[in-house]
Amino acid sequence: MSGLVREIAGREVTITSPDKPYFPKLGWTKLDIIEYFLEVAPALLGVLGRRPVLLQRFPSGVGGNNFFQKRIPDTAPEWIETTTVETVNGTPSRALVLADEAHLVWAVNQGAFVLHAWPFRVGAPGVDELRIDLDPGPGVGWSQIVDAAHATRELLAATGIRSWVKSSGSKGLHVYVPVTGSFDSYDVRGAAVTVARRLAAGHPELCTDRWWKEERGSRVFVDFNQNAPHKTVFGAWTVRPRVGAQVSTPVRWDEIDTFDPNELTVETVPERLRTQGDAWAGMYDDPQDIGALIDEWRNGLETVGDAPWPPVYPKMPFEPPRVAPSRARKPDEDH
C-alpha cells in the first residue's frame, strides 16, 4: 500500500507508506502506531493539546536513524498550526502545535511517535506544569524509584500541593503538578530546586540533588533542570523507541507499588485506558499554588545559592562554578 488519505478532525491527512515497519520485532507498522495514537488521542490531547512539541523522528522506524526536528518545514500542509519558540540563545524556531488529532497523525506520519512537549500552552500567560523527573542512576532499582515517588508526593502534600504521576516509558517516573498563576520557567525551575533539595535532605540515602554524576552514587537523581527555560519533556502517552514499544503512561498513585512499567505498551495501554479510564482526567482543572516553593528558592539565593544549570545556558546569578568537583582547583593550587 503506497499511501492512503484519512479524514481526521475535519482534515484530509495523507498517510504515506502505511505498511512501513515502525516496530519490526513486534510487527507494528506505521498505520498500527497511528491507530494507537488515535485511540489514546482524547487523553493525550488533554495533556499535550495546544502545546508546541519537539519532534523526534524515526523515518525508518525503531532501529533506524533518528533526529530531532524543532522547525516545521514550509512544505507542511497549510492547515498545520505552529508557534515560534526560542532556544536559550534566542534562536527562533517554528514548532508544531498539537491542535487536534489531525496534527497528531501528521506528526506520527513523519516518524514522530516520540513527542517532547514544552511546559506551556499557546496563548496561556505562563508555564502551567512543574515536572519532577526521578532519574535512576547506576545501581538504582525500580523499588527505589517508587520510594522516591512516594517521598515526592508526601513532600508536596505537606505543602498543600497535589501531584500526579506517570511512567517515563523507560526506567524512571515523572511527577507532575499543574500550576496556577503566570509563573515563568525560572520560577518553576526554582520550585523544582526546592523539591530536590528537600528530598535530598530528608532522604539522603535515597535521593540526591547533585548535578554532577560523580556525586550522585546509587541514588535517585531529582532532575530539577527539566524545568529550565526552553526544556521539553517526553510527553505522556507517547511511545519510547524501545523494542517493546513502551508508553509513558499516567498511572494512579495507588498502583505504583504494583504495576510493571515495561508492560505498558502500544498493545496494552489502549485497553487499559478503555477499562480503567484516564488516571490524569481532570488534572488541569485543579491547578496548584507552588508559590511557597518558589519563595523558598528565592529567599535562599544569596545564602545557599542557586543549583547548577546545564552547560548550554548562560551563567546565572548565584550559580556555583560550572566545574565537576573532581576537576575543581584546590585552595593550595592557587599558590
Image (cartoon, rainbow, N blue to C red):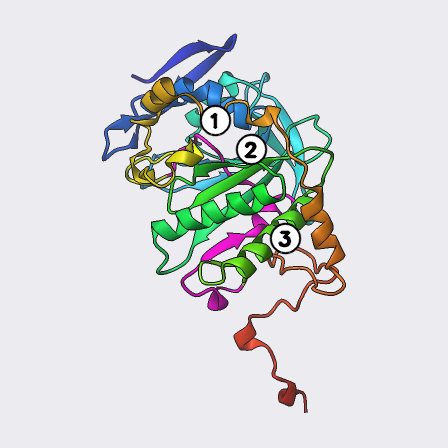
Within 10 angstroms of label 1, few (less than 14), some, or many (20 or more) residues? many
- Tag nearer the camera, 2 or 3: 3
Residue drawn at x 63%, y 44% is: 159
Q: Earlier in the sequence, mark 3 or mark 1?
A: 1
- Tag nearer the camera, 1 or 2: 2
Q: Position of residue 287 (x, y in %)?
A: 63, 30
Residue drawn at x 33%, y 28% is: 266
Q: Earlier in the sequence, mark 2 or mark 3?
A: 2
Segment colored magenta: 212-240
Q: Residue furthest bottom?
A: 335
Which labelled disc corresponds to residue 107? 1
Query: Residues under labels 1 and 2: Cα distance?
Result: 10 Å
Q: Do the numbered discs 3 and 1 sit on residues whose CB atoms are within 8 Å?
A: no
Which residue has dot 2 on it?
Answer: 53
Left or right placement of residue 84 versus residue 242 in this view = right
Q: Which quadrant would the C terminus be assigned to in this image? A: bottom right
Q: Do the numbered discs 2 and 3 sit on residues whose CB atoms are within 8 Å?
A: no
Circle 2 SS class? strand
Residue drawn at x 46%, y 14% is: 13
